[in-house]
């Protein structure tokens, strides 16, 4: 049985590839390398450089490699960018996902794991937010992902495709063995940016919004370590393979930290008091998003191993040092 991982040369997809290989799975990676890196794909996985919306290419990959499951990570993910380029997000995240789903059903793929987002919730009335609340995304990124969730539900009814939707909260940290981490030099994730600032790769960081209705005025998010997140994917795949029903699960720890709190932890762990500039709000950012994570624990038996913000920050710092030592090839 072979798993096709779209976006498998990127951050979260790359960790999924490592985890699949660690347990002896056969893996094919499809990535256009727009934000991923060929060096991040281990030799044991087959890397194909191309677009997941290329129907002929996907047809060929499914047939040649006897693809049994697809783990779909490839996507545009920057909320402010989605506000200024909505059509680009609907093309990449939604329209191309439609093509991928069509090829999957026609090619006889049995299982589909979808990388979704807490952005589908928009501004929830209460936190933590659970999977059965009304969905009201407030930015094109969240809407582009929600449309794929709808498509998956419809395709499952029509064609019997088994699927798991995993709604990510804020992903951070790195592989505990030091093999991979967040590698894009233009990453927008807070802990990545703060780690770069602490190590002198940036001249500080900008904090967007200090007037939100939160305890300290900055946005509150639920930060989940990337290997813990990938463990939920493996459990979801095992669940589907064992005949389990389709499911949608939040992936977070059920506890939030404000931007100011995260910056303080990065300063403490790194020992560096880097500049943090207070800026106005960014378009499309909700005030608070914290996961109601009961379902992933109860249905899949998920038990996180790295639920400690200081540990997550230390992993991010360690990876940033390794990445710097790689030189320009990274």
Image (cartoon, grey):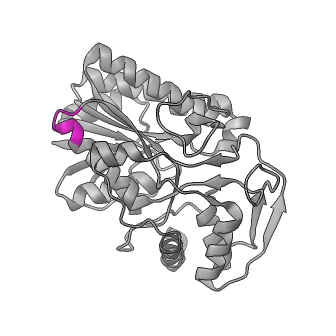
Q: How many marks?
A: 0
Q: Is residue 44 visible?
A: no
| Residue under the point 52% across and 33% down | 145
| Residue under the point 18% across and 38% down | 241
Q: Nearer the viewer, residue 235 or 2?
A: 235
Q: Is residue 321 left or right of residue 80?
A: left
Q: In the image, which residues are magenta?
A: 239-244
Location of residue 195 with respect to 118 vertically, above or below: below
Q: Nearer the viewer, residue 212 or 94?
A: 212
Q: Is residue 53 left or right of residue 208?
A: left
| Residue under the point 38% across and 59% down | 228
Q: Residue furthest bottom?
A: 271
Location of residue 159 with respect to 198 vertically, above or below: above
Residue 153 screen position, x and y as percent: 38, 22
Please tell me whether residue 117 belongs to the stretch shown in magenta: no
Q: Is residue 146 left or right of residue 228?
A: right
Instruction: Tell me the quarter of the picture where residue 83 sits.
Output: top right
Q: Is residue 203 visible?
A: yes
Instruction: Tell me the quarter of the picture where residue 143 sits.
Output: top right
Residue 94 screen position, x and y as percent: 51, 28
Residue 167 screen position, x and y as percent: 46, 41
Residue 8 screen position, x and y as percent: 38, 50
Position of the N terminus by quadrant: top left
Q: Nearer the viewer, residue 211 or 319?
A: 211
């Amino acid at each position: 049985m072979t798993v096709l991982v779209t976006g498998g040369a990127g951050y979260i997809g790359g960790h999924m590839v490592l985890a699949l290989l660690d347990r002896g799975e056969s893996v094919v990676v499809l990535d256009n390398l727009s934000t991923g890196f060929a060096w991040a794909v281990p030799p044991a996985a087959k890397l194909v450089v191309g677009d997941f919306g290329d129907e002929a290419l996907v047809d060929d990959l499914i047939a040649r490699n006897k693809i049994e499951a697809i783990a779909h990570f490839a996507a545009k993910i920057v909320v402010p960018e989605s506000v200024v380029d909505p059509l680009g997000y609907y093309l990449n995240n939604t329209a191309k996902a439609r093509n991928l789903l069509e090829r999957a059903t026609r090619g006889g793929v049995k299982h589909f794991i979808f990388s979704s987002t807490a952005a589908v919730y928009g501004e929830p009335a209460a936190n933590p937010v659970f999977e059965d609340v009304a969905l009201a995304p407030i930015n094109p990124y969240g809407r582009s992902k929600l449309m794929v969730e709808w498509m998956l539900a419809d395709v499952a009814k029509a064609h019997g495709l088994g699927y798991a939707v995993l709604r990510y909260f804020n992903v951070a940290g790195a592989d505990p063995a030091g093999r991979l981490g967040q590698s894009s030099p233009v990453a927008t994730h807070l802990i990545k940016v703060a780690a770069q600032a602490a190590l002198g790769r940036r001249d500080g960081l900008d904090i967007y919004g200090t007037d939100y209705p939160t305890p300290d005025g900055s946005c509150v998010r639920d930060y989940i370590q990337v290997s813990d997140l990938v463990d939920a994917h493996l459990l979801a795949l095992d669940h589907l393979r064992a005949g389990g029903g389709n499911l949608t699960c939040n992936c977070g720890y059920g506890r939030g930290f404000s931007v100011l709190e995260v910056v303080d932890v990065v300063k403490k762990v790194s020992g560096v008091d880097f500049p943090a500039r207070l800026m106005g709000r960014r378009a499309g950012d909700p005030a608070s998003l914290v996961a109601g994570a009961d379902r992933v624990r109860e249905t899949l038996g998920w038990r996180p191993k790295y639920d400690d913000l200081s540990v997550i920050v230390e992993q991010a710092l360690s990876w940033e040092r390794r990445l710097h030592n790689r030189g320009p090839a990274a």
